[in-house]
Image: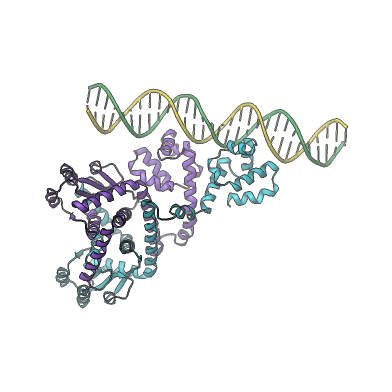
Chain colours: A cyan, B purple, C green, D yellow
Amino acid sequence: MSPLVKIRSERDRMSAVERRIADFILENAQLLRDYSSQQLANALGISQSSVVKFTQKLGFKGYPDLKYSVGEANARADNGDAPEHAASPDGGSPGAFAGNLWRRKSEAEEATRLINPAETIEAVAAAIGQAGQSGKVFIIGLGEDDIYARGFALKLSLLGILTVHNFDTARMTANISAATAGDVLLVFSEHGNHPALCKIARYFRERRGQVITVTRHTANPLRTLADIALVVSAHDELPYIQPLLYQSALQHLLDGLFVLLCEGHDDRHAQLLANLDRIQLMLEP
Amino acid sequence: MSPLVKIRSERDRMSAVERRIADFILENAQLLRDYSSQQLANALGISQSSVVKFTQKLGFKGYPDLKYSVGEANARADNGDAPEHAASPDGGSPGAFAGNLWRRKSEAEEATRLINPAETIEAVAAAIGQAGQSGKVFIIGLGEDDIYARGFALKLSLLGILTVHNFDTARMTANISAATAGDVLLVFSEHGNHPALCKIARYFRERRGQVITVTRHTANPLRTLADIALVVSAHDELPYIQPLLYQSALQHLLDGLFVLLCEGHDDRHAQLLANLDRIQLMLEP
DNA sequence: CAATCGAAGCATAAATTATTGACCAGCATT
DNA sequence: AATGCTGGTCAATAATTTATGCTTCGATTG
């Protein structure tokens, strides 16, 4: 039980001095942090031993124990709300701005999480895992989308999954001619409008591969070609902020996928460790 | 800041004994309630004074102060977590996991924000802005670090800043021979240990350019060569989680920088809009 | 190799906390 | 009214806990 509740409930049965202690604690719970039992006694003009006895009567081991409990109660009470918002009242410093940006990212993350059902993500993980064992994973993205594509391709290859990454529609078209059933194509395209990517997706389907698209949460041509579609939600009026939110939400979606892949298979996990070690050696001779 | 976040963020810079204390506290935060500094020391087989000095180094008034803070942090954490963990005792749903991962990312973001003073970030923005007007910005990163390097290079070029990006030390060395005073080199290297990157940084300094490094918050050779050093704090026991946190914290740091650059100059802002439009047309004919 | 610096421990000072025993007020019993 | 009992408070002090000064040791540097 919260120490404050306990104190309140016992208050009636207390002696005068005890009641003063109780009231002081109830009213100044946050100040207690910097008070020793002696200081508290001085503040009330009573003896230190009275304070200690008070704590023991209430069932605490002693004064520090009470103090610790009150600290916990305080923390639970003003959990989160006060400091964060108060910190940045108007525009503020760059630091405050970064915090603000992070809050926007969190919103985008949540929105994105809510529109991608767990089953969808698991299906994607399963498809990629399957392709990793018996086939190949093709990954493509253009422009800024290539950044995410590239990062994810690197991660997959660390897991020992054969990955073919391109940022060039011509090469990808050529590569895809080697695709077979069971392979997977991951297409990153924020707006899902690029004709060449649609053509590639269509071509890939003809070859019996599974198409996974990653786009904005809009109706778009690319998405209609998908066997499984991952979608991202991220909005801001400012044209230089919105991409940051998009990228962050997308990255988190991919990270979740990656973790799922890591935890699904022990051997993939082992593969990852081995690869990380190897890379470490390579980069730090 | 949560004491646990603080401890995690400083862990790298700690000595062996200190790190054992840090790990113990991180792993047994709830047990701390019943430990005096002496008991904690005994549990680890070290001296009590080491424990006290540890707490003071971290900026606490002393051991009780740390203990109290950890108590608060526990309370805050338990508040939100308890029901969630209870609901999913072993594996848990992917959705819950993603939320959890996001919390870890938030911690990494906070820790990273706190170790990069606003002035440092502003100085970096100023240096890049300056170089953007009259010189060039060179960007390099190897392996996974190339991902961030590449993303940032793309953003800078969208702002109309002349950017030379490489992921290859040989080419970069060649490119740098064209560097002059006022140019800026951005080096991404998580561990800051790669000799070739150090050489490039040294060479760049000889040519009177300004070196900005982006590394983990550890003492590392590359960082010592920096005119300005950005640092990232992100920790997790799991080898497949930690990189995600690192990448997220780093990305946010860069995003903050990018926003600063966007908001600093109206003409850069205009340039960005124009470029975004042009790219839009290019990708969606 | 000497000098320097930082980290860790030991011993001890300082502080905080817990306990003891004395004192006093209130109250019932004799 | 005097005595004895009870609960409450405090001052003094014991016990525990925390903080600091000093020394040693090992690593680093010039």
* Location of residue B107 in the rendering, given as x and y in whole percent from the top left corner: 39, 52
In the image, residue B121 above or below residue B99: above
Q: Quadrant of residue A260?
A: bottom left
Lateral position of residue A206 relative to residue B121, left or right: left
The image shows a total of numbered marks equal to 0
Q: Quadrant of residue A140?
A: bottom left
Lateral position of residue A31 relative to residue A210, left or right: right
* Location of residue A126 in the rendering, given as x and y in whole percent from the top left corner: 30, 68
- Evaluate whether residue A134 shows in this view: no
User: Residue visible at 70% across and 47% down?
Assistant: A13
User: Residue visible at 45% across and 59% down?
Assistant: B85
In the image, residue B161 above or below residue A172: above
* Location of residue B152 in the rendering, given as x and y in whole percent from the top left corner: 25, 56
* Location of residue A19 in the rendering, given as x and y in whole percent from the top left corner: 67, 45
Residue with the most extreme front position: B266
Lateral position of residue A111 relative to residue C20, left or right: left
Pick whichever, B30 or A247, lies toward us.
A247
The quarter of the rendered structure image containing the C terminus of chain B is bottom left
- Evaluate whether residue B191 shows in this view: yes
In the image, residue A284 above or below residue B38: below
Q: Quadrant of residue A208?
A: bottom left
